[in-house]
Amino acid sequence: MRSPGSQFVRIVTLLAGIVACSSREQAASQRVSVTPLASPAGPKSAEPFLSTIDKKTLILSWLERDVDSTSVTLRVATLDSAGEWGEPADVVRAKDLFVNWADFPSVVPLASGKLLAHWLQRNATGRYSYDVRMSESADGGRTWSPSTTAHTPGIPAEHGFVTLLPRADSTADILFLNGSPAPTDAPGKRGPPMRVAMSRWTAAGAVAGPEEILDMRACDCCQTAAAVTSRGPVILYRDRTENETRDIYVRRFVGGAWTDTKPLHADGWIIDACPVNGPAISASGEQVAAVWFTGARDTAKVQLVFSRDAGATFGQPVRIDAGMPSGRVDVELLDGGDALVTWIERMGKDSAEVRARIVRPDGTTEPALTVSPLSGGRASGFPRMVRRRDGIVLAWTVPGATSQVRLAALKIAPR
């Protein structure tokens, strides 16, 4: 296995300088402090994803290109409670992985103690023909089971934008966008609308039966999101109506069935293209926080709503951004009901910043924090975060000739 080596010191030193500079500019009332974390990801790394085991052991996955750029490896490493990274392990290495700045792989823990991974892999010669492939590890990521598809195999179509939702019975829901033709689609029709689909990963390590279609028409390339409340799962995705309204929609699993689809908020964003900007959601008990990007009425916004009844109803949206957001949002609920939101704010030309802000349950916002400057282009990807202990860990990509996944710990002071 390749070792992170001495680059840890170099990365931490650089990030410490960034954090020190930005921290001097924060308001005195800022409750969020940022500490750089060493990253186990090597050069030419990107598309990070974070999860935790019981909010203690951190799991980081990422894609890393070989030196010759012909092969790509999905890698995973864990950070233990003592703050030590384990040796990075390879989940899969191949020349035919489908790599997309907005459609990133993930690795999550199952209740059984196993790890479950997903990635995208080409299945035909078409430019956008690829599968969602799944594999699990019973030894902490050192070895992985033979992969299988999360959907009906052998169909040359797009499948992606996956959310893995582990359940208490050691299974996991697999939420994704499915471009497979429906029986009613006309033969030879170019690309049916993407559909919202759900599969189930069983405790036996397999996909159970064919996927269930939850929505017959969704936005083509926005991430899905899901969380488990005390009443059951809640999912979010960007819908697509016949007149090209592309607002965020919500569904809940209640009484053994999915509720009807309804808007999270009626933005009324009509756009004849995919904005490549999915929602994010976090849940604790019956409390839910959901955040999303919209460009309705020619005004770019990052907005957040709270629910106190497990997603059955939501309050009025709170605007989070500073006026020039790119979106690419994430959210985590904190102790006491506050929510921490992250997003990318444009600063002009190709420059941008990863920002974070606490929003209180009553809708009031606290001062925004600049976590790091970065490029505003696609190569900077989607920053991801996760709760760990009493704080947050954030991962993002600094693009360039030797792009790099970087990490920081965000500690939240009590009110």
Image: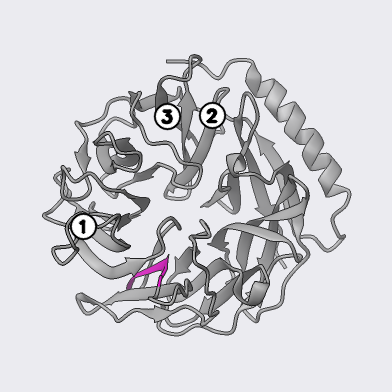
Instruction: Tell me the magenta residue range.
Output: 231-240
Looking at the rendered structure, the kind of residue marked 2 is: Ser
Name the magenta segment's main secondary structure. Answer: strand
Mark number for residue 310? Answer: none
Say left or right for 281 vs 360: left
Looking at the rendered structure, the kind of residue marked 3 is: Arg
The x and y percentages for residue 336 are 59, 70
Foreground mark, 3 or 2? Answer: 2
- Let me know if residue 231 appears in the view: no
Residue at x-position 31% and y-position 48%? 158
Mark 2 and mark 1 residues within 8 Å of each other at the beta carbon: no
Q: Nearer the viewer, residue 59 or 46?
A: 46
The x and y percentages for residue 318 are 65, 77
Mark number for residue 45? Answer: 2
Mark 3 and mark 2 residues within 8 Å of each other at the beta carbon: yes
Residue at x-position 73% and y-position 34%? 15
Name the N-terminal-most of marks 3 and 2: 2
Looking at the rendered structure, the kind of residue marked 1 is: Pro
Name the N-terminal-most of marks 3 and 1: 3
Is disc 3 placed on a helix, strand or loop?
A: strand
- Let me know if residue 213 appears in the view: yes
Mark 3 and mark 1 residues within 8 Å of each other at the beta carbon: no
Residue 292 sits above or below residue 119 on the image:
below
Magenta-span inclusion, residue 236: yes
Is disc 1 placed on a helix, strand or loop?
A: loop
Residue behind mark 3: 75
Residue behind mark 1: 181
State which quarter of the image contains the C terminus: bottom right
Residue at x-position 30% and y-position 63%? 195
Specify the quadrant of the image occupied by residue 36. Answer: top right
